[in-house]
Amino acid sequence: MNFISHVLFPAILNMSLTGSIVILAVLAIRFFLRRAPKRWSYLLWLVVAFRLICPVSLPAPISLMGAVDAPATAGGTIEYISRPVVPLQTPAPAPVLPDPGTSAPATGTPATSVFSPAPVSIVDILAVVWLAGMALLLIYSVVSCLRLRRRLSRAVILRDNVWQSDRVQSPFILGCFRPRIYIPFGLDEQTLHYVLTHEHCHLKRGDHIVKPLAFLLLAVHWFNPLCWLAFHLMGRDMEMSCDEQVLAREDGDRKVYSTALLSFAANRRFPAPSPLAFGEGEVRPRITNALNWKRPKIWVTATAGILCVVVLLLCALNPRPAVGRYASILAFVEETLSMEKTAQYFVLDGEPIHAGGAPTATANVLDTKVNSLKKMGDLSGLAPDGVLEAWEFSYLLALDADPSQIVLAGGQYAEDEWYNLDGYFNIIALRYDDGSCDVLGYERQGGDNYDFKGERSYEEALHDWYVNKYDRTAISPPYVVEWTDKFGTNLARRYDGKDGWCIYIPINVWEYDGIDSWRSAYGTGAGLSVLTATVTLEEWLQTAREDGLTITPEGRRYRVDREDGCFFLYSYANPLVVDVRWPNTPSWNDYAPTAEQEREELLRMARSLVEHPLPVTTY
């Protein structure tokens, strides 16, 4: 039963809702096709059957379901109603065994009860009602068909599969696999010719199979009144299209054909129709259509055909599902607020709050609302699937607690008995081209993973957060890194050169002094400059050898030492030179690093220079 109520029944409801939208679309298109051949109107019901029987479809950039904002999923389905969660069965209490020393009967759960039954939900009840209604319709169809066969047991064969009976007042077809045409006695030759041509047209198109299948779909979706209307109108379009085909093929007299239809309607005493036996249906609209029928012009037929094909495609295809989990950042905020059920707060118990903390209490959340939601920055070109966005978010809570007992700590505040207990949050989202998004990070401000350190923009902070989380340093190095060594921990910010290189400079320690040049903030005279070589790397090295300087290879670079510092030569496409000058005066600042420490930091800065394998966006 869980499968029926929690899987099958929700799928039927979703298909029925989608089918309802398509039925309304077909009704609208039928209005514009009222002057066109009825075979096109009949063809349109095919897409209704597809939507009522098939839960999946292909996605497309343009579709009717997209126009009505249908909730398409990545699995190819449309889900207006989510599958309910199946409640887990919880173990029943252990049975109470009798005391061996007493004769008193034991009480408690019987030993045979291992699990307590799951509670019956409204979905289970509706699923049972749906099954009952479907069963009644199917039983009715089978019983009516059997009764009809019994009434026709004395029918006489005329020829082939044509049978005559005095219990028949109107022609019809009975059977799917070996269909028979039943007609009344006494038809004149011309009327008989029209009738048999009409019924053979049904058989040739397979209408004797289409009608039972349509009734089966109606039985499945019996609770949907639009499905009853669709079944009725489909039968009318089926008959009218056959009428038009007979008139077009036989080039017959419309008045004679209409008179034959009228004669069947006047003497009709046929029993209630069965899904396996269908006859002339509604006669009045068919007579009107037959009298007004004219051989359609080619352009009318072509236009109607093109329109039907377009409508079939638009109704059959699903919209492209949202790439991200959330339709927008607001959807994430709403989900977050809906999960706030309880909250802890500091409570006033008459004692002053001390360094060890204050007592806390828990209250139920009565309501929530957004206090602020602000986009701080975005970054494109790094995440391959979309745009990274930084948001600042905070919200307020209404609690079922005594306001006089709530103590607000630092950063917390109240606003008309709405409380901000959690401060502000940083949200890092990945927004896709369709406007949907995924939330990659969500944490209270000040957390280690979201602390935007250093004097930089939110774009740079987004860059570093993404690089650190997804290990993309081979493509784009971080903007700010921690330099931890024997001299302590410092932060270094990336500086991007114009020739596709970058170098890391410690924050608040080195002052920018001209183009690609930095000087010690402590006034020691130490400095570093980056310049592009005007000669080849070999010429630089040759000059260093002639001057008697020491050359030390270090991978793709060469270190050239001199008395007041050194050069680092980088063997890139355009040779780069890093000129390092040592401290040459004692520091007057007691907090300044020693000459040895400053020299070590200069060497580290020089060695941090790298050439980007890909261009890096600068800000």
Image (cartoon, rainbow, N blue to C red):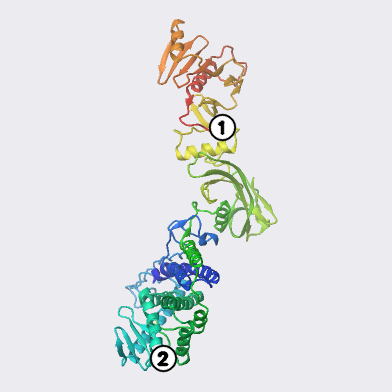
Residue 618 numbered mark, or none: 1
Residue 311 in the image: above or below residue 100: above
Residue 553 in the image: above or below residue 14: above
Q: Is residue 80 visible?
A: no
- Left or right of 352 in this view: 112: left
User: Which image quadrant for residue 186?
Assistant: bottom left
| Label 2 packing within 10 angstroms: few (<14), some (14-19), many (20+) | many
The amino acid type of the residue labelled 1 equals Thr
Q: Looking at the picture, how far across and down is residue 129, in whole percent?
A: 45, 78
- Left or right of 165 in this view: 477: right
Query: Which residue is label 2 attached to?
Result: 169
What residue sits 56% from the left and 52% below the top?
328
Q: Looking at the picture, how far across and down is residue 408, in whole percent?
A: 65, 50
**Quadrant assignment for the N terminus:** bottom left
The amino acid type of the residue labelled 2 equals Gln
Compare residues 315 and 127 and report the one nearer the observer. Answer: 315
Compare residues 555 and 397 and report the one nearer the observer. Answer: 555
Residue 307 numbered mark, or none: none
Badge 2 or badge 1: first in the primary sequence:
2
